Amino acid sequence: MILTTIDDIPGMKITKTLGLVRAGTTRTRGLGRDILAVIKNCLGGEVREYTKLVAEVREQSLDRLQEEAEKLGANAIVGIRFASTEVMSGVAEIVVYGTAVVAEEGQ
């Protein structure tokens, strides 16, 4: 599956647009990560526990996005965007969306 944030795929022709696909993941930070974050906040520096958590959530959302596109028969997703929001204190949602397409070699 080809994934891209631009609206076309260099060297390929989009032969069919299948529509919008979207996926999301909602996660809580967890007490252990919060304790480590408080310590890091006092000392300064990157909160690696949160960095890792956000990376995992993004990857899980992308996996789900690809599953949705495959159900439609797509071999690529163009125009991918991410959005995030805090659902409630300590709970964040990452949403990813794009356009499922069929793309072929050549322009």
Image: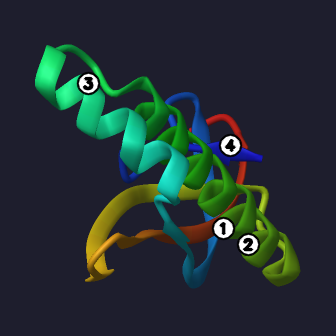
Q: Which mark is residue 2?
A: 4
Q: Name the residue under label 2.
A: 69
* Among the 4 quarters of the image, the one containing residue 107: top right
- Marks 2/1 in contact by CB < 8 Å: the verdict is yes
Residue 6 drawn at (x, y percent):
36, 45
Mark toward the viewer: 3 or 2? 3
Residue type at mark 1: give it: Leu
Q: Which badge, 1 or 3, is on the more N-terminal residue?
A: 3
Residue type at mark 3: give it: Lys
Does 53 appear above or below 27? above
Mark toward the viewer: 3 or 4? 3
Q: Which mark is residue 65?
A: 1
| SS for callout 4 | strand
Q: Which badge, 3 or 2, is on the more N-terminal residue?
A: 3
| SS for callout 3 | helix
Near mark 4 (Cα within 10 A), the count class, few <14, some 14-19 or many ≥20, is: some
Judge by depth and name the residue closer to the eye, 23 or 55: 55
| SS for callout 1 | helix
Q: Name the residue under label 3.
A: 40
Residue type at mark 2: give it: Ala
Does 68 appear above or below 94? below
Judge by depth and name the residue closer to the eye, 94 or 34: 34
| SS for callout 2 | helix
Does 65 appear above or below 47? below
- Rounded to the nearest angstrom, the CA distance separating label 4 from label 1 is 12 Å
* Among the 4 quarters of the image, the one containing residue 42: top left
Mark toward the viewer: 2 or 1? 1
- Rounded to the nearest angstrom, the CA distance separating label 3 from label 2 is 40 Å
- Rounded to the nearest angstrom, the CA distance separating label 2 from label 1 is 6 Å
